[in-house]
Amino acid sequence: MDRREFLKASLGGAAWAALGTGLAGCAGDPRPAAPRPRAGDPLGGLDAVAQAELVARGELAPAEAVQAALRRVAALDPVLNAVVTKSFDRALARVAEGGVSGPLAGVPYLLKDLTDWAGVRCTLGSRLFLDNVSESSPPLVRASEAAGLVVLGKTNTPEFGLLPSTEPLALGACRNPWDPSRSTGGSSGGAAAAVAAGIVPLAEASDGGGSIRIPASCCGVFGLKPSRGRLLDGGDAPGAWDIAVHHCVSRSVRDSALLLSLTERAAGQGELPPVGFVREPAQRRLRIALATRSPRGEEPAPDVKAAAEAAARLCESLGHELVEAAPAVAGEAFVEHFLTLWAHGPAQLVESLALRRIDPEAVLEPWTLGLAAEYRAKPLGSLPAALAFFAEAERVVDAFFADVDVSLTPVLASAPPRLGELAPDVPFATLRERCIRWVAYTPLHNVAGTPAMSVPLGQSADGLPIGVQFAARRGAEATLLALAYELEAAAPWSGRRPAVSPA
């Protein structure tokens, strides 16, 4: 794949086309006060399966489910800024027409603003694409709608999904429902905030370096990153570039498990056999490897370490075998190679803008520009070297999972930071080091293509969510989901409600 085709694949066809069609101005950054709005809506506490069951029994009309969700948006989103494109008329028209069917018929849903949806704005969190409208919907979106999900709009994301905190300059920061002064994480921050607050029971998310698991941890929801090549994400057979995957964040394990079964590749469409709908825990006891140090050898904050160790003790109490081990990947080298791949897309975008005589500094954030500059400063051959390193890292991880069933680590090095600490206009060198340390545990599973999940088991001393990461060999989503059901039953999280949520 040449550079132009890689950029086109990275940004999506409609966004690529928009590069040459003119630019839009920057939207304001709404920074409302943080009251505690209450929607007074019992549906806001139900997961997707429960709402779909009400629809199937005729006790709830799809239009009623959608209208209730729209009321929750009106009540809660002025604080959160989670829903940045509101397609309410389209959603209401769909349910008004009747005929919404499928296992999740009538359940309200949101798409991330990095994902195309035909006829709807897709900004990619950037001033560059504020007027960009998607020309088509990818297979994953079509499968989600075929399952009966009713899309209400798009959720907030950092520019091009490049930061682990959702604070885009174009659309304003997304605020954490547990404490609106805190980050939601990223890049699926708007999705996780909307689910945690009860606006929708689940929302589409994507993960190229932790972008499902990071916001799931920050917002106290469940987030499974599937194996590379598992879902109908619109790509062909995954290649060396393809470390990002799509799925969702959800309130319950069963919601994620059901949606996975409805959007995965069928037998013969990929190299992995389908998972199907995992409905319950398994009897098999697992060998689980605990590691609290990051690949760089750093320990997390004490409350994060305590949460991981408590999760390990919980697993042991359920009869699983615990050992201490981690894949032997050189942490510093991994970080540098990962950032090489991460910075490649921004560098190509800046080059493309220059060819079109568009000033990158007028339309791109400082973080994006800094990544591009870092890539341009690297020696020739850095990208092939990174891909070769990743191939070896994947072999190391495969060998590790030949000896254990599951790894258990923190998701992040600390609880959600305050908004502004990871904002795109923080000086580049400072922001770079903060990001590297905070997200040290998640990118390895993107490189290895292995499934991993954030399970909302912990809380900080001041009540902020702390997720715990579990990962397994490539293709072993069923192992993780079965374990997640056990953990959900042993340490339920569904009753916990953030400050900004329905009554």
Image (cartoon, grey):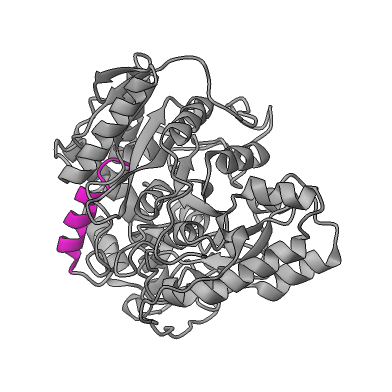
Residue 19 visible in the shown view: no
Query: Is residue 284 shown left or right of residue 298?
Result: right
Query: Is residue 500 shown left or right of residue 163?
Result: right
When the figure is inspected, residue 32 is found, relative to residue 474, above or below; the finding is: below
Q: Which residue is nearer to you in this view: 475 or 488?
A: 488
Q: Main secondary structure of the magenta part?
A: helix
Residue at 17% in and 40% down = 332
Q: Quadrant of residue 296?
A: top left
Residue at 15% in and 39% down = 299
Whether the magenta-drawn stretch holds residue 3 is answered as no
Q: Could you say where residue 123 lies in the image, as x and y percent from the top left? A: 50, 70
Whether the magenta-drawn stretch holds residue 437 is answered as yes
For the image, the number of numbered tags is 0
Residue bounds of the magenta highlight: 427-442
Q: Which residue is nearer to you in this view: 47 or 205?
A: 47
Residue 222 visible in the shown view: yes
Q: Could you say where residue 97 lies in the image, as x and y percent from the top left? A: 85, 66
Q: Could you say where residue 182 lies in the image, as x and y percent from the top left? A: 30, 65
Query: Is residue 210 shown left or right of residue 379?
Result: right
Q: Which residue is nearer to you in this view: 417 or 367?
A: 417
Residue at 39% in and 21% down = 318
Q: Quadrant of residue 96?
A: bottom right
Residue at 35% in and 25% down = 315
Q: Could you say where residue 465 lies in the image, as x and y percent from the top left? A: 33, 51
Q: Quadrant of residue 164?
A: bottom left
When the figure is inspected, residue 127 is found, relative to residue 417, above or below; the finding is: below
